[in-house]
Amino acid sequence: MQVIIILMLASIAVAGLFLGCFIWSIKKGQYDDEVSPPVRMLFEDKPGSTPSR
């Protein structure tokens, strides 16, 4: 029974860590670029450049 409690606490801690990282990335402006993704496919690649994956 104690193992279940330890695993629940560990999973809540990991979920809180991911939530904190997500909020931090939003505050740092990670998702602020709303213009270039829709029009990125309209720009041609330079000859000889390798596409990024």
Image (spheres, rainbow, N blue to C red):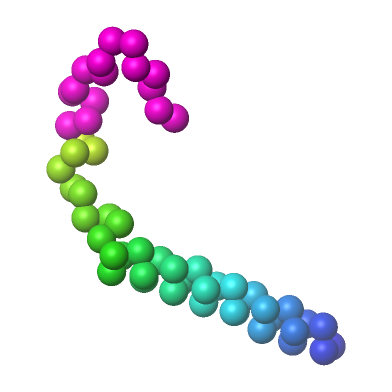
Identify the residue at horizontal 84%, vertical 88% (top origin).
1
47 above or below 11?
A: above
Name the residue at the top extreme: 47
Q: Nearer the viewer, residue 7 or 44?
A: 44
Which residue sits at x=30%, y=57%?
30
Which residue is rendered at x = 40% and y = 28% of the image? 52
For the stretch drawn in magenta, the main secondary structure is: loop
Magenta highlight on residue 40: yes
Up-down relation of residue 25 to residue 35 (above or below): below
Q: Is residue 23 magenta?
A: no
Q: Quadrant of the C terminus?
A: top left
In front of the other: 17 or 47: 47
Answer with left or right where residue 20 lies relative to residue 12.
Answer: left
Residue at the limit of the structure toward the bottom, as seen here = 2
Q: Is residue 18 left or right of residue 51?
A: right
Q: Give the extent of the magenta segment.
A: 39-53
Q: Position of residue 33 (x, y in %)?
A: 21, 49
Residue 16: x percent and y percent? 51, 77
